Amino acid sequence: MKRLIRAGAVIVATLFSSNAAALEVGAVAPDFTAVSTRGEITLSRLLPQGPVVLALYYADFTSG
């Protein structure tokens, strides 16, 4: 339950941050760095390898 609350707080904080903006379909995403299970990842370092999909899977290890 704590993980779910923490994930929700991170999502809300991200949505309300001053630099968050909606992108139009086909628009170029701004460069970003994020924490992953493999350490920090940076979009600009991943793009040369091919398309990048960023997914949030918050239901892991939950009953729902």
Image (cartoon, rainbow, N blue to C red):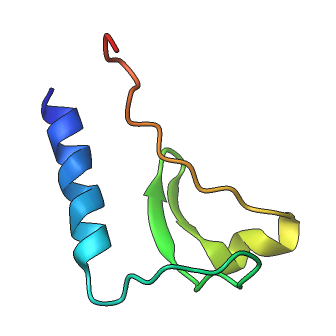
In the image, what residue occupies the spot 23% across and 61% down?
A: 12
Residue 58 x/y as whole percent: 38, 36
Dividing the picture into quadrants, the one containing residue 4 is: top left
Residue 29 x/y as whole percent: 63, 81
Most distant residue in the top direction: 63
Dividing the picture into quadrants, the one containing residue 49 is: bottom right
Residue 26 x/y as whole percent: 77, 78
Q: Give 47 or 53, whichever is nearer the viewer.
A: 53
Q: Give 39 or 14, whichever is nearer the viewer.
A: 14
In the image, what residue occupies the spot 49% across and 79% down?
A: 22
Q: Give 27 or 5, whichever is nearer the viewer.
A: 27
Quarter of the image with the C terminus in it: top left
- In the displayed structure, 63 sits above or below 43; it is above
- In the displayed structure, 10 sits above or below 44; it is above
Answer left or right for 22 relative to 17.
right
- In the displayed structure, 64 sits above or below 42; it is above
In the image, what residue occupies the spot 27% across and 89% down?
A: 18
Answer left or right for 21 relative to 61.
right
Residue 40 x/y as whole percent: 49, 63
In the image, what residue occupies the spot 49% across and 74% down?
A: 33
